[in-house]
Amino acid sequence: GDMAFVAAPMYIAEIADQRIRGFLSSVIYLMMLTGVLLIYIVGPFLPFYFPSLLGVILLSIELIVFSLLPETPYYLISKGKHEEAKRSLQKFRSTDDVASELKEISSAIEKQMAEKGRIQDIVLIKNNRKAMLIMTVLNAAQQLSSINVILMNMHTILEAAGSIYMESSSAAILFAALMLSAATTASFFIDKFGRKKLLIISSVLTGFCLLSLAIYFNLQYIGYDVSSISWIPIASVMVYAFVYKFGLGMVPIVITAEIFAPKVKAMGMAIADAIYVLAAIFSLQIYQILLSSVGMHIPFYVFSACSFLT
């Protein structure tokens, strides 16, 4: 599954008009969130095998449709197939007048081929090193802002908080719906307002949501009667779903294909994705360790701090 998050952004970055590249890159995430919401909706009410069957059907459709799409002009030119590249670009741009853009792509490819990337270039060259550092921080921040922790432990978190306002299955559906609506909204603003602004706003608001959860569990831990404010956890989790996906949960996947130099893009994206997976594993492990040793409030203090530091 993670292979798609390496290949798809590259494909989109190579075919999209620069003015809407951010929006099209965000569509990958929108489709993933649509799938999450769909599974959350049907999962509790249908046989256990149905979500897997649904996934097979949707992936089969995707495989058939995607096989009909042309290769990117960048790839075709890099293989010396200039006429095929011209036809590909004409198809993607819906016009025959692609000579200027084709020349730009050819120049970029020639430069890339002349400076063929090596794995060590990611570390040795300053710009590549800076790009790698940015993606390491952003991909780690995505996970250290507790997204997988909340997704995988939502029912236990709400039960521990004593929340009586919503069943766990309904909470999961609402959580996924809010994530999808936030990502959809952000996709229309990401090219207009820029990646940095969305990321800063999202990180700060995410930090406050996690901080409110941490304070609530801290008060509960020291014996304070929290029955009068038991609405805080469910509200914090739902607001978190929206503000996280509005920027911190989406911007990194959009800029991954934009930030690396062409000659190290494939290697850089693969490494960035590996860091994302490792950070996910680490966040889940640190949550379980802190939960069992010092209580529910400490991991959320940690995750809140990570969000603010982003």
Image (cartoon, rainbow, N blue to C red):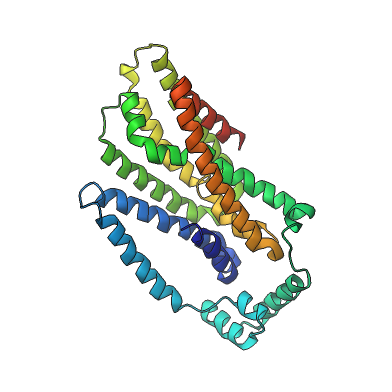
The quarter of the image holding the C terminus is top right
Placement of 286 over or under 47, stated as above or below: above
Residue under the image location 30 percent in, 24 percent down: 162
Placement of 269 over or under 97, stated as above or below: above
Placement of 174 over or under 30, stated as above or below: above
The number of discs equals 0
Residue under the image location 41 percent in, 56 percent down: 32
Describe residue 67's horizontal placement relative to residue 302 as left or right. left
Placement of 163 over or under 1, stated as above or below: above
**Residue 46 in the image: x percent, y percent?**
20, 52
Residue under the image location 39 percent in, 40 percent down: 152
Describe residue 34's horizontal placement relative to residue 274 as left or right. left
Residue under the image location 51 percent in, 53 percent down: 189
**Residue 283 in the image: x percent, y percent?**
51, 37
Q: Nearer the viewer, residue 269 or 175?
A: 269
Q: Nearer the viewer, residue 48 or 156?
A: 48
The part of the image, by quadrant, that contains residue 109 is bottom right
The part of the image, by quadrant, that contains residue 105 is bottom right
Say whether residue 193 is visible: no
**Residue 155 in the image: x percent, y percent?**
32, 34
Say whether residue 163 is visible: yes
**Residue 140 in the image: x percent, y percent?**
58, 42
